[in-house]
Amino acid sequence: MDYVATLQQHQLKATPQRIEIVDLLYKHGHINVDDLYKFLQTKFPSLSLATIYKNINTMCERHFLTELKIPSMKNVYELTKKEHSHVVCSQCNAIIDITLDTSKIIEEAKSISHYKLDKSSIIFNGFCPQCTVE
Amino acid sequence: MDYVATLQQHQLKATPQRIEIVDLLYKHGHINVDDLYKFLQTKFPSLSLATIYKNINTMCERHFLTELKIPSMKNVYELTKKEHSHVVCSQCNAIIDITLDTSKIIEEAKSISHYKLDKSSIIFNGFCPQCTVE
DNA sequence: CTAAATGCAAAGCATTTGCAAATAT
DNA sequence: ATATTTGCAAATGCTTTGCATTTAG
């Protein structure tokens, strides 16, 4: 995965800070601002929170990142991918992506609401396999 | 609808401010903090934002209210009802409740994720009939 | 070389807290 | 009568902004 090229495709200069943000998101999947800051600080001791916020904001504007609002959790960010849903563990806060066949439920929503729908956000809560065992 | 009794069932004293909050939510369905404040101020000129926040927080803790996190919108609150989904107009921000048959999609999510699921939050975005026309 | 990004400090909002006075039960 | 709630002011926390310096392309 060539982070430099990916950033440039979105008109974002490939600074070391940004490359590290992308790397973290690529490896962790979903991260909130504070954790991003903690991780990045180890690599860039002079890093400022303002830089994180500025980057997150421009990256979201360019649709390079997507902001995820999960009930009773801080917002997390992920690299923008094709539409998918999320499953969240209420115990350990693990978040995973799943791809569902949403066509039926979208049709149902359309016919009930009479809205012209173009996007859906589906989040499930429960317990992951590890947390279910213990 | 007896707001006093409903509040008391949730161990909440029926103050005039709270009664009005419930009334507003009952009539509007979904409201954010600022709008609540604006509406309530006309009736209680001395009302403090702190009171709104305190009430929203305790009401949510007692599951009398539910907080709704909608992408690119301020959080809104609604009276807690049986599980349902939301449809949001990206133009005028109208929010409506719809009840869908979610059993199939929940089963699908369970079998893909191997999580034990107990809750789902489904939000659709699009354009309401009025905004589609114009 | 130039436009964009970084880091710092200050500013701006949003939300919470502490406390005295008022109020619901 | 008592515990809870209100409203105010202050405090806290989160996010944004302005600006001088640095850096990517």
Image (tube, coloured by chain):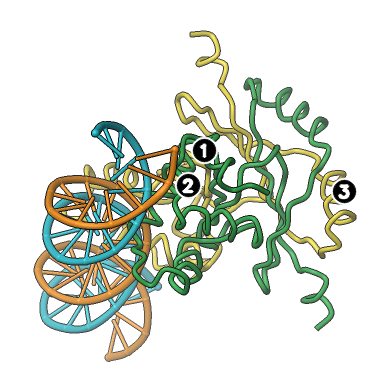
Chain colours: A green, B yellow, C cyan, D orange
Q: Chain of mark 1?
A: A
Q: Position of residue A97 (x, y in %)?
A: 73, 52
**What is the C-alpha distance between the residues marked 3 and 1?**
37 Å
Q: Position of residue C23 (x, y in %)?
A: 25, 67
Which residue occupies 67% across, 73% down?
A92
| Residue named by callout 2 | A14
| Residue named by callout 1 | A8
Image position of A54 (left or right of A4): left
Of the residues shown, which amino acid type is indicated by label 1? Gln
**What is the C-alpha distance between the residues marked 1 and 2?**
7 Å
Instruction: Please report contact status of discs 1 and 2: CB closer than 8 Å, yes or no.
Output: yes
Viewer-closest of C2 and B71: C2
Element at badge 3? helix
Q: Position of residue A99 (x, y in %)?
A: 79, 44
| Residue named by callout 3 | B108
Element at badge 1? helix
Of the residues shown, which amino acid type is indicated by label 3? Glu
Instruction: Please report contact status of discs 2 and 3: CB closer than 8 Å, yes or no.
Output: no
Which residue occupies 46% across, 56% down?
A16
In this rendering, does residue A18 appear at all? yes
Label 2 Cα crowd, 10 Å radius (few <14 / some 14-19 / many 20+): some
